[in-house]
Image (tube, grey):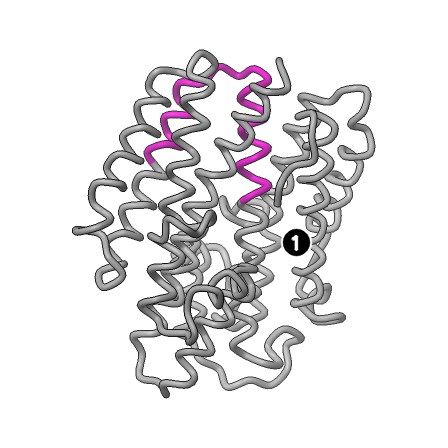
Amino acid sequence: MLSRTADHVYWLGRYAERAENLARTLDVQYRLSLLPHEVRSDGVGWEHMLVTLGLEGAYAEKHASIEPHRVIDFLAFDRGNPSSILNCLRAARETARAVRGSISSEMWETFNSTWLEARANAPSRFTARNVAEFIDWVKYRAHLARGVVLGSMLRDEGYHFMQIGTFLERADGVARLLLARLAGEPGADVGGPVALDYYPWSVLLRALSAFEIFRRVSRDSVTPMHVVAFATFRPDVPRSVLRSAQLVYENLQAVANARSAETERRAGRLHASLRFGTLETLTSDGATPYLRHVLATTADLSERIGRDFLGHASPA
């Protein structure tokens, strides 16, 4: 496969997944902001989210203070923010258009119609004031696109590159979501004494579409470290970090070339560390440093994939 085509399908997977990850991250903070709280603590929550996403500087260039509706608009609808959900949907559509000959017509129609509907509705129906409807719509369109990809795409190199992009982005996004929530509870990342609040962590599980799964397969109570370990180390949870790392590794093996041995080794090492990780792994050194190491590894893999397969260093 031409490196240009591989690059497009890889980033198609990443942009589509990034839009969904941002929607799920917004979902958590938006729901928590509806609880009774002090005004200052609410602002701190939105600030933690921006910092974890690495967008605090870009936001500060546009707005002097952190206000929930401004943060929502910046992350969801701001056409000047390259990482906004709206721009991710547009980028996914543009990359799909560039490789129409390598994907199914159903895939193109799905990504194209998603962007057209988002563009038409964002100024009116979808706004910062009713962001819950927009979040649900993004998740629905993500489910639809995923089903079309799995049901219509040839299992060739293009498919493997799209899977690599999708699950590398998912591992990064879930790690950032966990970090944002841990930042709101000092001491939680080492299992230290914190005021147990069931609701925020149940909201996080629901944002990962894993609340019912947690109740079904785990006997643990809904506490910070139990939820973090569950979302990080469970191989059978669709959005767990381990599951994503496993699929990145398997799909890298399927497209391995003469230059990619070190990239494959590092992906395998990340997978192994997650596969054999436990609750004690998090509490010994802290969940926050561990998750930051996961983010550093995914960034390293992104750069190496760009160099080994796509003919350039991948942008962050």
Image quadrant where residue 43 sits: bottom left
Q: Is residue 144 left or right of residue 187?
A: left
What residue range appears in magenta? Answer: 144-169
Q: Position of residue 281 (x, y in %)?
A: 73, 63
Residue pointed to by mark 1: 295
> How many marks do you count on the picture?
1
Q: Is 43 colored magenta in this rendering?
A: no
SS category of the residue bearing label 1 = helix
Q: Residue at x 31, y 78 (%)?
A: 35
Quarter of the figure that contains the N terminus: top right
**Image: 310 above or below 313:** above
Q: Is 158 colored magenta in this rendering?
A: yes
Quarter of the figure that contains the C terminus: top right
Q: Residue at x 36, y 25 (%)?
A: 148
Q: Is residue 149 left or right of residue 165?
A: left
Q: Residue at x 37, y 29 (%)?
A: 147
> Which SS does the magenta portion mostly show?
helix
**Image: 60 above or below 278:** below
Q: Residue at x 26, y 34 (%)?
A: 116
Q: Is residue 316 left or right of residue 121?
A: right
Q: Position of residue 156 (x, y in %)?
A: 56, 15
Image quadrant where residue 192 sits: bottom right
- The residue closer to the viewer here, 230 or 87, is 87
Neighbor class of circle 1 (other Cα within 10 Å; few <14, some 14-19, many 20+) is some
**Image: 18 above or below 207:** above
- The residue closer to the viewer here, 183 or 66, is 66
- At label 1, the amino acid type is Leu
Q: Position of residue 97 (x, y in %)?
A: 40, 22
Q: Residue furthest left?
A: 124
Q: Position of residue 272 (x, y in %)?
A: 74, 45
